[in-house]
Image (cartoon, coloured by chain):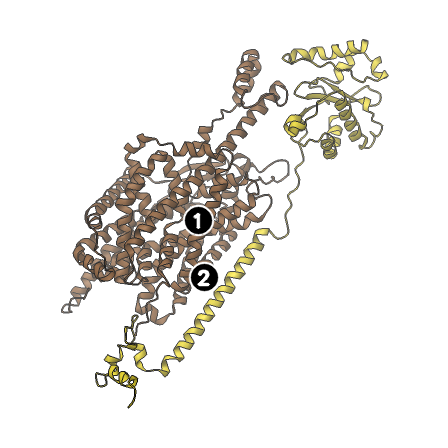
Chain colours: A brown, B yellow
Amino acid sequence: MEKARPLWANPLQFVFACISYAVGLGNVWRFPYLCQMYGGGSFLVPYLIMLIVEGMPLLYLELAVGQRMRQGSIGAWRTISPYLSGVGVASVVVSFFLSMYYNVINAWAFWYLFHSFQDPLPWSVCPLNANRTGFDAECEQASSTKYFWYRKTLNISPSIQDSGSLQWEPALCLLLAWLVVYLCILRGTESTGKVVYFTALLPYCVLIIYLIRGLTLHGATNGLLYMFTPKLEQLANPKAWINAATQIFFSLGLGFGSLIAFASYNEPSNNCQKHAIIVSLINSSTSIFASVVTFSIYGFKATFNYESCLNKVILLLTNSFDLEDGFLTASNLEQVKGYLASTYPGQYSKVFPLIKNCSLEAELDTAVQGTGLAFIVYTEAIKNMEVSQLWSVLYFFMLLMLGIGSMLGNTAAILTPLTDSKAISRHLPKEAISGLVCLINCAVGLVFTLEAGNYWFDIFNDYAATLSLLLIVLVETVAVCYVYGLRRFESDLQAMTGRTLSWYWKIMWAGVSPLLIISLLLFYLSDYILTGTLQYQAWDASQGQLVTKDYPAYALAVIGLLVASSTMCIPLVALGTFVLRRLRRGDPAPVA
Amino acid sequence: MSRVAKMSSCCYNETKRQQHHARRSKVKEASPLNWELGPDVYLQKCESDAENAFKVRLSIRTALGDKAYAWDTNEEYLFKAMMAFSMRKVPNRETTEISHVLLCNVTRRVSFWFVVTDPTKNYTLPADEIQSAIRMNRNRINNAFSLNDQTLEFLKIPSTFAPPTDPSVPIWIIVFGVVFCIVIVAITLLVLSGIRQRRRKNKGPSEVDDTEDKSENTITIENGIPCDPLDTKGWHINDTFMTEDERLTPL
């Protein structure tokens, strides 16, 4: 007979699991970018509005479905309606794609972590060139941190067509990353429940340490003031609202099936409404907290670069005009420049083209997101701090905790439906199923360790989950409200938890949230169609910077396949179920 | 007096180029031999961009901040001594004296040009020899002035980079190996204990009734008696009453 369904040892484990899943790398490297791009402090307005209107209701919906159906995503949606089990399948497919490429980030974090135990840090100095007369040419053009990322870590090829060979160092790190994930999910909720204490709490410890360090850095206040000064005119920009909605949506990890899986291990009487509100509030406040840290680091880095630039100009002028050493300072620079220009025009005009215009605003304006922020900008700031090894270790350890926490959710989304299915769990113990899933993901993930691997990573990152998730969550909301029936669901929840459903949730689920998702979908579809050819950023080693290139035909085919394979599951499974029903005419109607 | 006159004639041409700061007139230690040569020869040997002449630039305040020393004739003497010392290390040049090193065009930046002449003072030593001598003793020269390669610059003489220290086994592999072994050991332990638990469970249920297998996740318990037996015994024996009887004190 059926074994007892494993449960979380206490509700706190469930909350920590949700937090460690939702609080991921996006909070650290995507939200600060959005905040900077869309008006600084004023971005918080659309963000918080979207949180209340979209984030909390959808999160509560997923947790309630999981807790009520007590099965993984496929089983839960099959229970709601057999025609809709395609939604569950689509969730599993998207989670599969996500876990394939997401763990590569953990591999990179491991790589940087292991390299942090050296003095000096390997990304702080350029290596010497072949005949030891100077620094490596590529490193001179770019910076030492960019060189370490693009050349030493990725060994990136000039375009996606040049696949290159497998890099054994990132491959080893990827293997280690999957072994660590396997270790955490090996025993199901028993092991996951204990690991989430660490993956949920440790990042906060590191963030607090970094906050204290960050705020005391020289120039941190420049960054904070610049970024958080509200630019109220951005509130009228529709892109700000769309990006706020998108960020809330993806940051909470809706639609992957992980939340359903986690909630399915709950006691039926668990108060998931309270937990939904807690988790979404903690997720958003972590984003804001992380952006304070990020902006102070930005400010430090920008001030440092600005002062280096000024020093270079001072040195140039001192040498060209043989001024006394120490005479030129930042404060009298403009004055002296004017004096020199008027007194020695000939010589000044010779030197003038070499003088760079140093601007603090220009340094602060460089907005970066994604892996570029985590592995280039942060490392550049860290290498200029004292005891940089310690800060580097702390930082990459935090990235690892965030990444592994999210991976636990992703793999739970894949494993829960598999272990729920009697066909599979009868033949294989759950350790073997987890092992197989990790093995397959690791093998496919080796593609991302090729020389062109980062370009494929960007494809997966941009296209594997975006459109499909919006569609999945839309179908979920419509399914619960209109197919299963909102009144029926409401009475189920009341019987389960003993609490009545507030009118607010009913309005949100039935009306506002689906409308929001439809408008997001329309926006993204029109954006894709209007953009025409899709392009990507390739690293040019000779120039030492990124250049834009078009995707080749087969890459576009892969993108189309990624989006289609998850979205098509919904209609295909519905169609398949319908056909099977017709073939088995005369069978009694399935019990929901 | 004539020495001073010689000095001013030497530096007069340069004053035109560097007009915007006062020239510090220096009394150079000219040897009696130099004395005999006319000012033209002196001019030829040491001037900006002369053959075999090197420009030196010092950034004392940048390097030392508050502890910066002033550049005066004594420091120049030390510099000449260091140059002579470096040249003495070159074979065939062991007889180089301080007086063979000529400095000129000292600016407020602190930068100047210098040449090294041979003992006869007829010609200046070739630039290659001076360059190799300085490169070999760069450390000693830097330390004499408490400066480094960036703050005591010999323009045209590139600094040698220290060769990278590559340990035989990169450090990251060591850390990787440690973490990898720990994770493998932990996985093995967990898997083995899981297998052992399952084997124990498999042996266990075969000795117990089917009752156990039929228990659901929530075994409702009332009065200390599981309700399931109510179903399985087919309603023939009502265990609730049976066990209650046993609890009653026997008569």
Q: Residues within 10 Å of mark 2 (few under 14, many from 20)?
A: many
Q: Residue visible at 30% across and 76% down? A: B224
Image quadrant assignment for residue B210: bottom left
Outermost residue toward the left? A586
The kind of residue on which mark 1 rests is Tyr
| Above or below: residue B60 compared with residue A390 | above
Out of A99 and A338, give the one closest to the viewer: A338
Location of mark 2 (residue): A183
Residue A163 visible within the image: yes
Residue B85 image position (x, y, % from top left): 80, 30
Tag 1, which chain? A
Q: Nearer the viewer, residue B242 or A114?
A: B242
Residue at 43 percent across and 54 percent down: it is A199
Residue A24, compared with residue A327, is above or below; it is below
Nearer-N-terminus badge (2/1): 2
Q: Find numbered disc 2 in the image and state the secondary structure of the residue it sits on.
A: helix
